[in-house]
Image: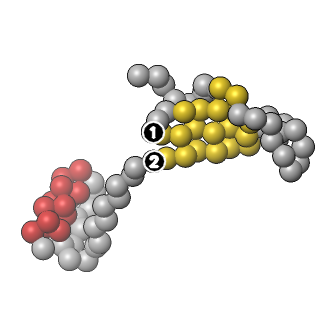
Amino acid sequence: MALNESIAAAVAAQKEYTPVPGKFHLFRVDIEEITFVRWRSDNDQYLARWPPGVEQLRRGTSATSNAPPEPYSDLLVPD
């Protein structure tokens, strides 16, 4: 309950309302890997993965198949 009270006080200090301790849930999410995939109208597939910080492009050769991956850089910033 002490954690809920401290979170409620921190939110109240930054926002225009005060949460009621015990009336909200706290969640923790540990993210180990993120993959972002998008397609453009040309049917090309763009993929970014972190870690290891890899981006690639797979050109759409048809509506049901993709070409081999190619190196690509758009989203991730190199270290």
The disc label shown at residue 33, or none: 2
Along the line of sight, the residue nearer the viewer: 37 or 12: 37
Position of residue 72 in the picture relative to residue 40 (left or right): left
Along the line of sight, the residue nearer the viewer: 55 or 24: 55
Quadrant where the C terminus sits is top left
Q: Quadrant of residue 62?
A: top right
Which residue occupies 47% across, 22% down? 78
| Mark 1 or mark 2: whose residue is earlier in sequence | 2
Looking at numbered disc 2 in the image, what kind of residue is underneath it? Glu
Which residue occupies 68% across, 43% down? 38
Q: Position of residue 21 (x, y in %)?
A: 18, 73
Which residue occupies 48% across, 39% down? 50
Q: Position of residue 41 (x, y in %)?
A: 82, 40
Q: Mark 1 — residue?
A: 51
Check disc 2: other Cα within 10 Å, few if <14, some if 14-19, many if 20+.
few
Along the line of sight, the residue nearer the viewer: 74 or 7: 74
The disc label shown at residue 19, or none: none
User: What SS does tag 1 mark?
Assistant: loop
* Dots 1, 2 in contact, CB < 8 A: yes
In the displayed structure, would residue 2 be above or below residue 55?
Answer: below
